[in-house]
Image: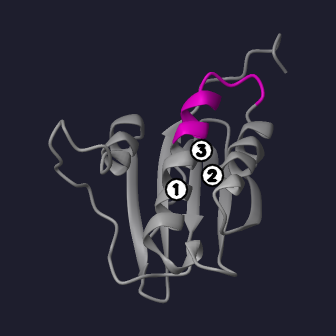
Amino acid sequence: MIPAPNSQDSRKEIHRWRRTFPGTRNQIRQARRFAASYLTGHHEADTVQLIVSELATNALRHTHSGQAGGHFHLTLYMGSQLLLLAVTDEGGPLTPHIQHTGTDQPNGRGLHLVAELTTRWGVYGDHHGRTVWALLPLTPPNPAAA
């Protein structure tokens, strides 16, 4: 389950943006751009793009989203101090989890990276569709960049 915003954000406006992307590799870039477009001036924009890239890549590699005709959804919830991002896929046989891979392995570090860059992350759903979410604190935007 996605955590509720903290009490400070619950008194303020929370914005929500959602977009569906075709399940092709070139759409990962589009998903990063989509997320970045709402984070202009925030220091966390690059981190968010990296997390979106990792979660969208996992959706395409490990679920039905990456098969012909597949798709994935990216949802952003942003308050004044928190950002929750979620990638929803079309399901697959395995539940996402952090892998403990050796240094010689080229893959398998995505969720470890997500865990290191976020306050919390989690998964809910089943083989019909899963959502992997990540929660990040936000610093106030830089007015000069906005």
Q: Is residue 21 magenta?
A: no
Q: Which residues are magenta?
A: 40-50
Mark 2 or mark 3, earlier in chain: 2
Residue indicated by mark 2: 10
For image coordinates 67% across by 37% down, the residue present is 80
Residue at the image point whose x is 47% and y is 75% from the top: 63
Q: Residue 12 vs residue 120: left or right? A: right
Q: Is residue 41 left or right of residue 67?
A: right
Sequence-wise, the earlier of marks 1 and 2 is 2
Residue at left offset 67%, top offset 23%: 140
Q: Looking at the image, can residue 8 be seen?
A: yes
Q: Look at label 3 and name its amino acid.
A: Leu
**Front in this rendered view, residue 88 or 11:** 88
Residue 69, position as x, y percentages in the image: 70, 81
Establish if 26 lies above or below 116: below
As measured in the structure, the alpha-carbon distance from the residue carrying label 1 to the one carrying label 2 is 31 Å
Q: Single out the mark in the foreground, 3 or 1.
A: 1
Element under label 3?
strand
Among the 4 quarters of the image, the one containing residue 33: top right
Residue at mark 1: 57
Q: Which residue is mark 3?
A: 83
Please determine whether, in this image, residue 117 is positioned above or below residue 18.
Answer: above
Colour basis: one colour
| The image quarter in which residue 38 lies | top right
What's the amino acid at mark 2?
Ser
